[in-house]
Amino acid sequence: MVEELKKSKDFDWSFVSREQAATGLEKDEYYVAIIVPENFSANATTLLDDHPTPAQLIYEPKQGENFTASTIANSAAKELKAKVSAKITEAYANSVFDKIADISSGLGEASDGASKIADGAVKLDDGASKLKDNLVVLSDGAGKLLSGVQPLKQGAAALKTGATQLQEGGSSLAGGLSRLSAAHKQLADGAAKSAAGAKQLSGGLQQAAQGAVKLQTGAEAVADGGAKLKSGAMSVADGSGKLQTGLAASVDGSAKLADGLKASADGSAKVSAGAKSISDGLQQLAAANPTLAASADVQKLIAASKAVADGSAQLQKSQAQLAQGASDLHSGQEQLAAGAAQVHDGAQRVAVGAGELSGGAQQLNAGAQQLAAGQQKLAGGASALADGGSKLSAGMQQFGAKLGEAAQGGSKLAEGSAKLESGASAFAAGVAKLGGGIGSVAEGSQKLADGAGDLKDGTDGLKSGSAELAGKLVDAAVKTDVNRTDGTATMFAEPVELNQETLSKVPNYGTGLAPYFLSLGLFVGALICTIIISLRNVTVEEATGFNRFVSRTLIFSAMSLLQSLVAASILLYGLGLEVQSVPRFYAFTFIASLSFMWMIQALVTWLDQPGRFVVIVLLIFQLTTSAGTFPLEVIPKWMQSIHPLLPMSYSVQGFRSVISTGDFGKMWSDAGTLAVYGVIFLILTFFYFITRGRDSQTELNSEQVLSV
């Protein structure tokens, strides 16, 4: 049916989906839609069913868009129904003859099926014999295969697991022991340097103590000398000499102390680096070997290495504090030495200034206090150094113990290698057994496959032949039985029903043509108004062009309003026209009337009588191109191209929307287009009165004077 319609030239059919058709009807792209449901062909074949269902064509005309087009489409739908019904009736007749031919064909195929049953039975017997002989061989091979496969499976699993663990553990252990050896050596060097630094620190502290005693003695001597300044300058000179000697010894001691602390700090840094390397190496070793990581001893070893690293770091921090204290001590002692020199010089000039000696004594006292504070810091750092050394010693002992446990782990690795060798032996034995069993199974399986193949061929032939025989016989019986009922006869006569579903239904022909004739009446009414009312002349002789424009425009606008109210009221209340919205109908009627009025006013104002002729020609074109009666597609192509340029095309569409379809969006769109037309021509009228209005009024006045 679709192919026949595509070949038809009577109508411009568009073959779209149901959704596209509905959208096209809403957008006024189509006048009618004829829907062929998905079950159309299936329903057409239900003639012989218990409850035959006629095939339906759904016919959806849009009368509100164009009543004449929907009428034409209605006739086309009926003709289409008749053609389709004829085709289906012809198919029904052919089906009857085909059934008779199917009976003969079905019986012949039934005979062929019986032959296949016989052939299949022979093959089935041969296959069963071969199967019996070869099952014995298959049983022996299966027993051997079962005995050999199980040990092979177990041995292969053990071999795979042991080999994997051995490879991973050996690699991780080798790398970890190598890093551990290097780190242990660094740790030993650092410990030795730390011991040497500790000894130097001890000696420096002893010298510092001696210097402090001498410093205290010198400070007391200075104090005594200050008190006895007036009684004996010689005593002051002796005291200042002793002070200078003691400070020199103290400076030497503080220098040695600084050197010792520096050496100790270097040793502590190396100890800390070695301890950290050991800790990192143990952690990497545990991460690379899950077995070692799960060991509690290994975890203890890692914890001990971390403790050593932490203690070394704390020791390094303490020694840094000691070095800072020694530096402060040395600075203080240098200041004391300078002060002692000044005291010695001042003692010689004691007679000159007792005040200078008093100031030197104060500086000496301040230096003594700084020295005491530095010695306190030094004592605190020495205590921290002692604690760190103790922790380092304990960590080294624990680390040595864990190295022994690591040696035991190496022994276990050797035992695992021995188990791997044993597993490999078991694997070889299993493979040997598997070889014998697989050979037997292969031989028996091959023979069994041959017999089973023959048996399957025979069974398949028997099965297909018997099924085909039964099916063909049943089909032949069913095909020869025609289910005839009253419904069958009715459907044979009329297999297609036309189901019409109207969109935006138009009740009568007058309603369908109302948009066309209402547009025509408003246009002609506007033309008549220009004949009755003067378009250029006004009663006020001295009126300006703008005033004359306003006067003429208001008069014609009022006439437009009057004629739109009269026309709409007569249609609504006199003739009983039913619209979708009365207020919108009045509004659109006024907009269309005003647009026509302003357009005709401009043409006649500019051209006078020739302008009315132009309006009449324009009216004739609009009557044929506005699609008010017949569809736009039936007029010539060149006239179709004029359709969107003329205002009556939009007035007809807008009236259809407000009267029949209820598409108010499209109505307002058409109203906007008409308003644009009206405003353009109103501007033209305005230009006439501004540019030529005064000259025209003068000519008219002169003619009136001459006529008197």
Image: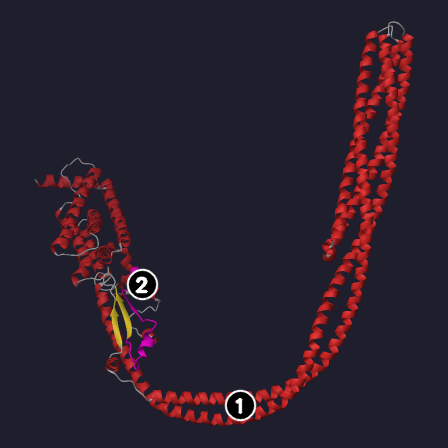
* Magenta span includes 39: yes
The residue that appears at 18% across and 54% down in the rendered structure is 613
Label placed on residue 458: 1
SS class of the residue under badge 1? helix
Q: Position of residue 546 (x, y in %)?
A: 22, 38
Work out whether residue 104 or residue 572 is closer to the camera in this orientation and state it: 104
Residue 407 in percent (x, y) is at 82, 55
Q: Position of residue 201 (x, y in %)?
A: 86, 32
Residue 615 in sight in this render? yes
User: Where on the picture, by quarter, is residue 406?
Assistant: bottom right
- Between marks 2 and 1 in the image, the one whose residue lies nearer the viewer: 1
Q: Is residue 200 above or below residue 605?
A: above
Foreground residue, 61 or 214?
Answer: 214
**Separation of disc 2 and disc 1 at Cα?**
60 Å
Q: Is residue 351 magenta?
A: no
Badge 2 local density, few (<14 within 10 Å), some, or many (20+)?
Answer: some
Q: Residues within 10 Å of mark 1 (few under 14, many from 20)?
A: many
Asked which colour scheme the image uses, the reply is secondary structure
Q: Residue at x 71, y 79 (%)?
A: 434
What is the span of residues highlighted in magenta in the rendered image?
25-54
Residue 381, by quadrant, is top right
Q: Is residue 393 above or below residue 469?
A: above
Q: Nearer the viewer, residue 216 or 77?
A: 216
* The N terminus: image quadrant: bottom left
Residue type at mark 2?
Ala
Say which element carries label 2.
Answer: helix
| Residue 100 point in image, percent of width and height | 34, 90
Residue 177, visible in the rendered structure: no
Q: Which residue is mark 2?
A: 22
Q: Nearer the viewer, residue 26 or 13?
A: 26
The reply to whether dot 2 and dot 1 touch (C-beta < 8 Å) is no
Q: Which quadrant: the C terminus?
A: top left
